Image (cartoon, rainbow, N blue to C red):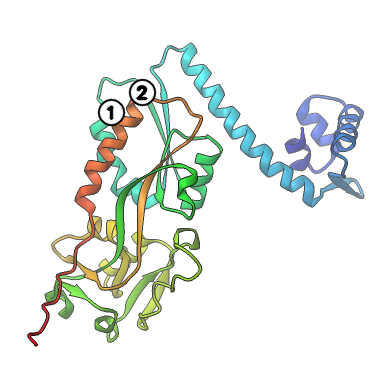
Amino acid sequence: MLQVVMHSPTLTEAARRLHVSQPAISKQLKQLQADLGFVLFERQGHQLIPTFEARAMLDQVARVNASLDVLNRLAGEFRAARRGHIQIGCISSAAMHLLPKALKATLSAESQMLCTVHTGNTAQVVEWVETQQIDIAVALKVRNAERFAYTPLLELRLECLLPATHPLAARRSLTPQDLAPYPVIGIDLPPIVLPGPEAPAWDDMLRSVHIRVDSAQVACSMAEAGLGIAVADSMTVAASACKSLVRRSLEHPYRTEIGVYRPSYRPRITMVDELMAALRAEASDLAPLRPKRRKRSAA
């Protein structure tokens, strides 16, 4: 009822959508406000304007409804005698570069397993894990990841993607100082993945960032278009490298990792364990480059 009232211009319209009388919905709304102990709507003319409390409650109602949708789908699958349904949450970069081959190695052509992939940013994916909406998630490591069933999958470092004909392509590893004379496309890293407030911004040492984006894939696409050198996470750079674009390690202290999250109360599914093993195998091909150690000069 709350959702319908909030999205209807008047109580009369809400009653029509709910197939009840207007007095009946008014009575239910008054009773709900009395039970909660605060006002949900303020009347302005013929319209009801939702209060801050009503909007906050609606957000929680949406989450509950999402969980109920999962339960309803699961019940429908049991009635139809399906083998099962796996819900996967994934950040976009992992969905593009890690998940496809891992799923191919896990799902057989004869399998009747239904697999649904939901993509979002790390904060959204972790929230899906917390609210038990998914069976497995792939996302960046967050602060306090130990609160979840978290398994490290792949270390991520900063790497450079640049044309094979670029003057810096002749070097095996680069420093921020090397990049200074050239245009750089940099990514904004979400605060949720940083180890703590004392960690410096990743681009403190880079003064030649001409374009800033919030997607590593976008940064690499811009490098391919010739807009500059992309500085992005090693997984996306590794997947984007080709004959015309080469990857080079960047000597920078920034480190994070991507990993697998499992919800606490979802039923265990054998295929999810198999998918985890396939993700580990695929991750090994996207490992970051290791900068060659510089030889110490003789004393």
What amino acid is labelled 2 in the image? Met
First reached walking from the N terminus: tag 1 or tag 2: 1
In the displayed structure, does residue 92 sit left or right of residue 294? right
Identify the residue position indicated by label 2 in the image: 113
Residue 287, above or below 62:
below
In the displayed structure, does residue 181 sit left or right of residue 203? left
Q: Quadrant of the N terminus?
A: top right
Instruction: From the top left corner, tell me how far across and down residue 195 is, in percent.
Output: 44, 62
Report which quarter residue 161 is drawn in: bottom left
Residue 273, above or below 84:
below
Q: For the point 78% across and 45% down, which residue is it?
A: 54
Instruction: From the top left corner, tell me how far across and down residue 85 is, in percent.
Output: 42, 25
Note whether residue 254 is visible.
yes
Disc 1 on helix, strand or loop? loop
Q: Seen from this angle, which residue lies furthest left?
A: 298
Q: For the point 92% across and 50% down, which residue is it?
A: 45
The disc at residue 107 is: 1
What amino acid is labelled 1 in the image? Leu
Q: Quadrant of the C terminus?
A: bottom left
Report which quarter residue 112 is drawn in: top left
Instruction: From the top left corner, tell me how far across and down residue 128 is, in percent.
Output: 52, 41
Instruction: From the top left corner, tell me how far across and down residue 235 is, in percent.
Output: 28, 56
- Asked if the residue under mark 2 is in contact with the one under mark 1, i.e. CB atoms within 8 Å, the reply is yes
- Give the camera-side residue of 120 and 49: 120
Note whether residue 121 is visible.
no
Q: Residues within 10 Å of mark 1 (few under 14, many from 20)?
A: some
Q: For the point 81% across and 36% down, which residue is it?
A: 13
Q: Residues within 10 Å of mark 2 (few under 14, many from 20)?
A: some
- Give the camera-side residue of 216 and 151: 151
Disc 2 on helix, strand or loop? loop
